Image: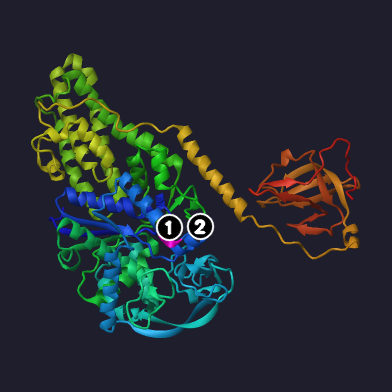
């Protein structure tokens, strides 16, 4: 484990256009909190910094949608986000907001420093303009087709499908999100950071200096960007929401959100230092400080190319030591989406599961999207709680505490001579702090969480093998040693669980009366001290650390998602426009009759096609229909259907189809037949 050091830990500033969801937690905030907690309890000087990003284009867009001012939006969601983090146990040293005066001042000074040092280039260029709204279309005010991957819903600053950073003018077939109009090009003046001038610096700093210690997904994206050739990036925008550009001739312009937002880390640190009576500068300007950014993969370019180039241009700041970005977390097989409400919102989770903060922390960590996109399912969440937390961790603690109270009135017994298995168990136990430290320091939090569970597995196996509940009648002196060793494992868990399961850690320490010891065990003590809970120490009564999650609890969450899915499908269902006017003569050419399906089978090697034999009253004919994904062949026998019998025959997969069955689709995508169910309507009846 590394020597104590000063750390500045930042986690991505959340947009205040909506609450926090599990994708944010898994990608950024839980790993950052695990890392920060670990650093603190191992004796390091830590500033864990965050705050609300209140200047993104998404905020005035949300305000327009809700018919309120942007200030109303940021105040509403800042309060929800901040309280959610607090209730969930994220231990920021400071959670600020970019609307704070100290941030406006810090961002403005940073811009002016670069401006006065000649670090910007000033250009008049053509930008997308919405004539109907009388507004330039920056970032999220325009959507179109991504030139990199073809996603038709890319934004003017970024494609959320492939993660590419874009300029609005890069989009193919752009459309204004304000009016829906096709924008035109109009000249405007902006200030640009010439990223191309920092290519050599970025190659040396990242591509050479961090080739071995940065995550491959981060390194690969940076390399791709740099190898593709960097271009000047505008750091100002034509908007009425944001920090005004602090130079003459910039009226009506604000700082680009991705210029001002990362400076929010600095201003939040200043706010914290001022409150705590500290000097903020060592946390950002001392080369012995380790700066680490926790972000999602969609923010890699901003934190690894744009912000470092800004810091390099300013000249007095340290650069990040690491940027351990995670991939994306999906939900029940679909991409998380704020706009479509396809998410598990943190504040709603805390209402539904008020005492299970650690369960969500653990489930998200054990399934963290560290190297690839992963999928959160409520079934996996339930299984991890019931099998791993309740059945493993909780089971061990409950057994050792219950037996200690039963046999010794809760007093840690004095051990007798240790057997080989006792010594082996204690030796394995002392190795775990180093093993878990290694995982955390390499940003492998998923691995670390499983090593923590291995500690409780060690305790469970030890008790199961030694069976003190049997020996208590025949060899009570041996049982004292077994219980003593088991309690040392429990004490180690009370400390090692703190980064991953902080609420559980607090509860377990209370059960073990850990704080009443003269010298409570620390992380390093587990490896070096022979005794963590001394003989004679009084522990408390057993309490359940975790409780089972029932199927009914999970079904409620699945029902909520199903309702969201149906609402989205209904909203996205478009009504087909009326077709070209048909004459009465056109209509009379169509021969629509009632038919009865008499045979049905799947088309070989075709996923969607069924081959039907239909009695039309005229004859029994073959009709090929693309309904195999909706109906089983055996369920269709005897079904009355409406058939267009005089449609020109057509071969499908070598089978001639002699007609068409009329159907429609419900809002949730279900196919239904257009057919009469009245008795007495026989095959061949004409529909007129």
Q: Nearer the viewer, residue 469 or 12?
A: 12
Provide the residue span drawn in magenta: 69-73
Residue at horizontal 43%, vertical 48%?
Answer: 345
**Residue 70 part of the magenta segment:** yes
The kind of secondary structure element at disc 2 is: helix
Q: Is residue 52 above or below residue 542?
A: below
| Nearest the eye: 641 or 209 | 641
Residue wearing tag 1:
73
Q: Are marks 2 and 1 in contact (CB under 8 Å)?
A: yes
Which of the two discs, 2 and 1, labels the residue nearer the N terminus? 2
Q: Horizontal and vertical percent for residue 359?
A: 35, 40
* Residue 682 vs residue 129, the one in the foreground: 129
Magenta part mainly helix, strand or loop?
A: helix
Q: Disc 2 marks which residue?
A: 66
Q: Residue at x 37, y 64 (%)?
A: 299
Mark pair 2, 1: CA separation = 9 Å
Looking at the image, residue 171 sits to the left or right of residue 528; the answer is right
Above or below, 681 against 32 in this view is above
Q: Which mark is residue 25?
A: none
- Note whether residue 25 is visible: no
- With respect to residue 386, does 135 lie above or below? below
């Amino acid at each position: 484990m590394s020597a104590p050091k000063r750390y500045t830990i930042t986690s991505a500033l959340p947009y205040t256009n909506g609450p926090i969801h599990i994708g944010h937690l898994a990608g950024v905030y839980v790993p950052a909190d695990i890392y920060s907690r670990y650093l603190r309890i191992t004796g390091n000087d830590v500033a864990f910094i965050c705050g609300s990003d209140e200047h993104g284009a998404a905020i005035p867009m949300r305000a327009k949608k809700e018919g309120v001012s942007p200030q109303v939006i940021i105040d509403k969601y800042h309060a929800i986000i901040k309280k959610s983090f607090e209730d969930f146990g994220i231990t920021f040293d400071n959670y600020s907001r970019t609307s704070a005066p100290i941030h406006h001042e810090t961002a403005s000074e940073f811009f002016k420093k670069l401006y006065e040092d000649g670090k910007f280039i000033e250009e008049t260029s053509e930008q997308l303009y919405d004539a109907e709204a009388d507004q330039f279309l920056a970032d999220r005010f325009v959507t179109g087709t991504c030139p990199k991957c073809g996603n038709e819903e890319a934004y003017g600053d970024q494609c959320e499908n492939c993660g590419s950073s874009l300029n609005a003018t890069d989009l193919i077939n752009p459309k204004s999100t304000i009016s829906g109009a096709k924008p035109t090009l109009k000249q405007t003046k902006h200030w640009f950071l010439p990223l191309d001038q920092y290519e050599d610096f970025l190659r040396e700093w990242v591509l050479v200096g961090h080739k071995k210690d940065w995550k491959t997904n981060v390194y690969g994206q940076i390399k791709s960007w740099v190898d593709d050739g960097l271009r000047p990036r505008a750091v100002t925008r034509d908007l009425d929401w944001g920090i005004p550009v602090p130079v003459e001739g910039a009226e009506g312009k604000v700082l680009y959100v991705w210029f001002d937002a990362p400076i929010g880390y600095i201003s939040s640190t200043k706010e914290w230092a001022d409150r705590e009576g500290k000097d903020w500068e060592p946390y950002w300007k001392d080369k012995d400080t380790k700066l680490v950014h926790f972000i999602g993969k969609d923010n890699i370019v901003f934190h690894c190319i744009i912000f470092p180039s800004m810091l390099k241009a300013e000249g007095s700041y340290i650069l990040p030591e690491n940027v351990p970005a995670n991939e994306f977390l999906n939900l029940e097989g679909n991409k998380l989406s704020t706009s479509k409400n396809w998410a598990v919102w943190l504040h709603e989770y805390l209402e539904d599961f008020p005492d299970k903060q650690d369960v969500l922390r653990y489930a998200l960590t054990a399934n963290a999207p560290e190297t690839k996109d992963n999928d959160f399912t409520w079934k996996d969440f339930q299984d991890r709680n019931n099998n791993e937390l309740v059945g493993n961790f909780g089971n061990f603690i409950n057994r050792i505490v219950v037996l200690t109270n039963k046999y010794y009135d809760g007093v840690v017994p004095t051990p007798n001579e240790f057997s080989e298995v006792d010594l082996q168990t204690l030796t394995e136990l002392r190795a775990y702090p180093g093993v878990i430290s290694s995982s955390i320091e390499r940003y492998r939090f998923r691995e670390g969480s499983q090593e923590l569970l291995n500690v409780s597995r060690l305790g469970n196996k030890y008790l199961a093998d030694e069976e003190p509940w049997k020996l208590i009648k025949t060899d009570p002196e041996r049982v004292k040693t077994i219980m003593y060793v088991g309690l040392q494992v429990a004490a180690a868990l009370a400390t090692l669980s703190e980064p991953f399961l902080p609420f559980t850690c607090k509860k377990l320490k209370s059960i073990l009366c850990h704080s009443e010891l003269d010298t409570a065990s620390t992380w390093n003590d587990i490896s070096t001290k022979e005794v963590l809970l001394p003989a004679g120490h009084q522990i408390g009564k057993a309490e359940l650390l975790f409780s089972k999650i029932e199927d009914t609890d999970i079904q409620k969450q699945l029902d909520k998602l199903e309702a969201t899915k149906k609402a989205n499908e209904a909203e996205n269902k478009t009504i087909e426009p009326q077709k070209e006017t048909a004459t009465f003569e056109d209509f009379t050419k169509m021969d629509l009759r009632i038919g009865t399906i008499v045979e049905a089978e799947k088309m070989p090697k075709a996923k969607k096609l069924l081959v039907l034999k239909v009695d039309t009253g005229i004859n029994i004919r073959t009709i090929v229909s693309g309904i195999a994904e909706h109906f089983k062949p055996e369920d269709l026998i005897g079904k009355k259907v409406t058939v267009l019998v005089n449609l020109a025959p057509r071969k499908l997969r070598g089978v001639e189809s002699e007609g068409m069955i009329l159907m429609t689709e419900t809002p949730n995508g279900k196919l239904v037949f257009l057919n009469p169910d009245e008795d007495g309507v026989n095959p061949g009846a004409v529909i007129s």
